[in-house]
Amino acid sequence: MKKIDLHIHTVPSQLSDGHFDFCIDTLKEYVKKLEIDCIAITNHNLFDLEQFKFICSELAISVLPGIETT
């Protein structure tokens, strides 16, 4: 069975997100530890193409673009 996480935030964009700094190493650890096959980057009301490309280049799994709208 494939494991996917379609709700990954990489930018704190709402008060409910709280403050955090994106860390590619933490994301890599998360993906490896849970043996995830695919993720989607789904920040609130924004999409950072450069960051998305960077994440895609750093992970050996499928990464989907997404956006969570209010």
Image: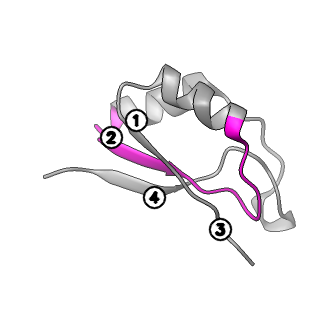
Q: How would you rate the neighbour count of disc 4 (Cα within 10 Å): few for under 14, some for 14-19, many for 20 or more?
A: some
Helix, strand or loop for disc 3: loop
Q: In the rendered structure, are the residues bearing label 3 and label 2 in contact, judged by CB atoms less than 8 Å apart?
A: no
Stretch in magenta? 33-49
Asked whether 38 falls inside the magenta stretch, the response is yes
Q: Earlier in the sequence, mark 1 or mark 4?
A: 4
Q: How would you rate the neighbour count of disc 2 (Cα within 10 Å): few for under 14, some for 14-19, many for 20 or more?
A: few
Residue furthest left in the image: 1
In the picture, measured across the screen, residue 55 lies left or right of residue 44, that is left
Q: Position of residue 34 (x, y in %)?
A: 33, 40
Q: How would you rate the neighbour count of disc 1 (Cα within 10 Å): few for under 14, some for 14-19, many for 20 or more?
A: many
Q: Earlier in the sequence, mark 3 or mark 1?
A: 1
Closer to the camera: disc 2 or disc 4?
4
Q: Position of residue 63 (x, y in %)?
A: 45, 41
Closer to the camera: disc 1 or disc 4?
4
How far apart are the alpha carbons under marks 4 and 3?
A: 11 Å
Q: Give the labeled residue for mark 3.
A: 68
Q: Give the labeled residue for mark 2.
A: 34
Q: Earlier in the sequence, mark 4 or mark 3?
A: 4
- What coloring was used for the rendering? one colour
The amino acid marked with disc number 4 is Leu
Q: Earlier in the sequence, mark 3 or mark 2?
A: 2
